[in-house]
Image (spheres, rainbow, N blue to C red):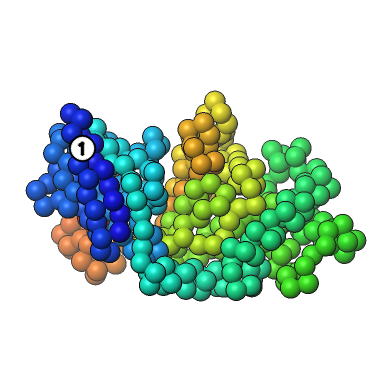
């Protein structure tokens, strides 16, 4: 269930309550489930998805981007009570968000299953409790490793994804544990803890497993405590989290630094691409109100050949021959229209 207050540019307001799960189109069209009759709104501007795992709003590619609390969303965003979404010149205020007890149980079961598959560290019955228990320890370990390896100074001078630096970091963690500078709880898997901390200190932290997972198409980090992934077209919140905002900021910086970009209060938003072509968008305060935000849109590792596109019906044989001839003759090509991804979601 979700309760929405719609405010039109003229000041007129109306309240709408959606009680059942499903996809609701937001736009100017007569067929829209939430109709916004204003010229600044596209016929199908956005859609609202109510699922057992939560409520999400997807931007369908209107002329103006959908904004959540003043910040443009990359492709989609979770919907929480108190959020305000700007669609064109109209505003959707989220008054209430809730699910039934059965839906909460289903979402909890899915979250637990995903947690067990992606992190050996969290082995208690309550993933959230396990993370809270380890957070002070992780902060202490990070400070010890950063000081021992002098990574504050070396951050800009090294390839932080390099094998050598990871080996140094892992060795430092092993030494800290062996010399009892920290007290690791008996029920925590030592190897898993060292692996996770190595990833967070010199890698991509808790999102590394999702970057390596070909079934995950998008990763959304809304502050250090909220991580969402898109798998098979469905958005799921996962129990993984960053130790704190500083840890998340270090991951963002080591992503954008090799791109020749910087991110700070003077330049709080960055767009770029990872080496594998994945698109990234990072936003930090003061633009973000929930701490650092990171969105990564991954692309399939499989490249489609022209023949494969013809075989699966994306192109006709004549279209393929025409495009091949244009390339061979070095002709300019203009691609115009709605991306296939947006058509599929609408």
Residue at x 63%, y 68% (from the top left corner) = 122
Residue 35 position by quadrant: top left
In the figure, is residue 196 to the left or right of 8?
right
Residue at x 69%, y 38% (from the top left corner) = 156
Quarter holding the N terminus? bottom left
Residue 250 position by quadrant: top right
In the figure, is residue 72 to the left or right of 334?
right
In the figure, is residue 162 to the left or right of 222?
right
Label tally? 1
340 and 92: which is toward the camera: 92
198 and 317: which is toward the camera: 198
10 and 142: which is toward the camera: 10
> What residue is shown with label 1?
13
Residue at x 50%, y 62% (from the top left corner) = 238
Residue at x 30%, y 54% (from the top left corner) = 2
Seen from this angle, which residue lies furthest right? 179
Query: Does dot 1 land on a helix, a strand or a loop?
Result: strand
**Circle 1 residues within 10 Å: few <14, some 14–19, many ≥20:** few
191 and 105: which is toward the camera: 105
Is residue 65 at all visible to an observer of this figure? no
Q: Position of residue 54 (x, y in %)?
A: 38, 60
Quarter holding the C terminus? bottom left
Seen from this angle, which residue lies furthest top? 266
Q: Position of residue 189 (x, y in %)?
A: 72, 71
Q: Position of residue 291 (x, y in %)?
A: 54, 41
Instruction: Indicate whether 19 appears above or below 282.
Output: below
Q: Position of residue 255 (x, y in %)?
A: 57, 45
Is residue 113 at all visible to an observer of this figure? yes
């Amino acid at each position: 269930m979700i309760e929405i207050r719609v405010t039109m540019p003229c000041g007129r307001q109306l309240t709408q309550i959606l009680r059942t799960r499903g996809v609701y189109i937001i736009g100017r069209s007569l067929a829209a489930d939430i109709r916004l009759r204003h010229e600044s709104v596209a016929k199908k501007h956005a859609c609202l998805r109510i699922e057992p795992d939560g409520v999400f709003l997807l931007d369908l590619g209107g002329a103006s981007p959908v904004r959540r609390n003043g910040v443009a969303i990359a492709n989609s965003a979770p919907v929480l009570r108190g959020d305000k979404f700007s669609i064109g010149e109209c505003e959707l205020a989220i008054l209430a968000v809730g699910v039934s007890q059965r839906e909460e149980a289903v979402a909890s079961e899915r979250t637990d299953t995903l947690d067990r598959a992606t992190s050996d560290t969290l082995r208690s019955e309550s993933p959230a409790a396990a993370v809270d228990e380890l957070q002070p320890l992780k902060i202490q370990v990070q400070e010890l490793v950063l000081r021992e390896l002098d990574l504050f100074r070396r951050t800009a001078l090294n390839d932080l994804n390099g094998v050598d630096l990871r080996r140094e970091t892992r060795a430092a963690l092993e030494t800290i544990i062996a010399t009892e500078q920290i007290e690791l709880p008996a029920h925590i898997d030592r190897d898993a803890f060292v692996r996770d901390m190595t990833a967070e200190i010199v890698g991509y932290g808790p999102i590394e497993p999702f970057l390596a997972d070909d079934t995950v198409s998008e990763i959304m980090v809304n502050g250090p405590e909220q991580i969402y992934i898109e798998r098979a077209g469905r958005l799921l919140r996962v129990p993984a989290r960053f130790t704190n905002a500083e840890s998340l900021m270090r991951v963002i910086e080591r992503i954008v630094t090799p791109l020749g970009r910087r991110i700070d209060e003077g330049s709080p938003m960055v767009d770029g691409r990872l080496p594998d072509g994945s698109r990234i968008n990072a936003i930090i305060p003061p633009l973000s109100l929930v701490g650092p935000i990171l969105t990564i849109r991954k692309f399939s590792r499989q490249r489609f050949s022209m023949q494969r596109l013809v075989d699966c019906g994306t192109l006709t044989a004549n279209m393929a021959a025409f495009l091949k001839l244009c390339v061979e003759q070095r002709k300019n090509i203009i691609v115009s229209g709605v991306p296939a991804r947006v058509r599929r979601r609408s």
